[in-house]
Amino acid sequence: MVKQQTQKELVDELTNKMNESIKNYKNDPSEELKFLDFISRFNNYSVRNISLIQNQFGNAVGVASYKQHKENGYQVQKGEKAIRILAPKFQVVKTNEGEKLF
């Protein structure tokens, strides 16, 4: 029986791969240029998420949620796997008096 990865294990694995690839860019200027070219395709994503996208599917030319694909008239092929990226987690911060800061 194959053990399902927990969410934390999956995030840790993806983060480790991302960090390793970023270290490799520092060592090889040609890889860094390829990464910069890849970054130019994804201006709405952080460098970390772009690195995750590249590690999971290096030929990606666009990224969208399943819902966005449907809204644009595209159907995701049966058996396709999702590209995992890190989503921001926003928190409401309040002062001691209960006033919202952001």
Image (spheres, grey):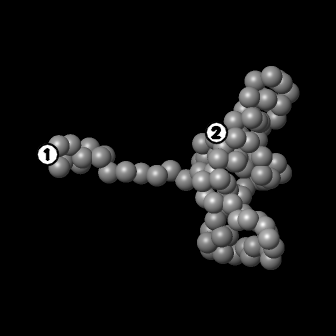
Q: Amino acid at mark 2?
A: Val
The Cα atoms of the two marked residues, 1 and 2, are separated by 37 Å
Identify whether 95 is placed above or below 79. above
Identify whether 5 is placed above or below 90. below
Q: Is residue 40 visible?
A: no
What is the quadrant of the N terminus in the image?
bottom right
Q: Amino acid at mark 1?
A: Glu
Residue 91 location in percent, x, y? 37, 51
Q: Earlier in the sequence, mark 1 or mark 2?
A: 2
Q: For label 2, count other residues whose C-alpha is less than 10 Å away and answer few (under 14), some (14-19) or many (20+).
A: some
Residue 99 location in percent, x, y? 18, 47
Element type at mark 2: helix
Residue 76 location in percent, x, y? 75, 73
Residue plotted at (70% across, 41% down) = 16
Q: Is residue 94 visible?
A: yes
Residue plotted at (77% across, 46% down) = 55
Residue plotted at (83% across, 51% down) = 59
Q: Are marks 1 and 2 in contact (CB under 8 Å)?
A: no
Q: What count of labels does the image hold?
A: 2
Element type at mark 1: loop
Identify whether 54 is placed above or below 23. below
Residue 32 location in percent, x, y? 78, 29
Q: For label 1, count other residues whose C-alpha is less than 10 Å away and answer few (under 14), some (14-19) or many (20+).
A: few
Q: In the rendered image, which residue does mark 1 sit on? A: 97
Residue plotted at (29% across, 46% down) = 93
Q: In the rendered image, which residue does mark 2 sit on? A: 47
Q: Residue 59 or 78: which is nearer the viewer?
A: 78
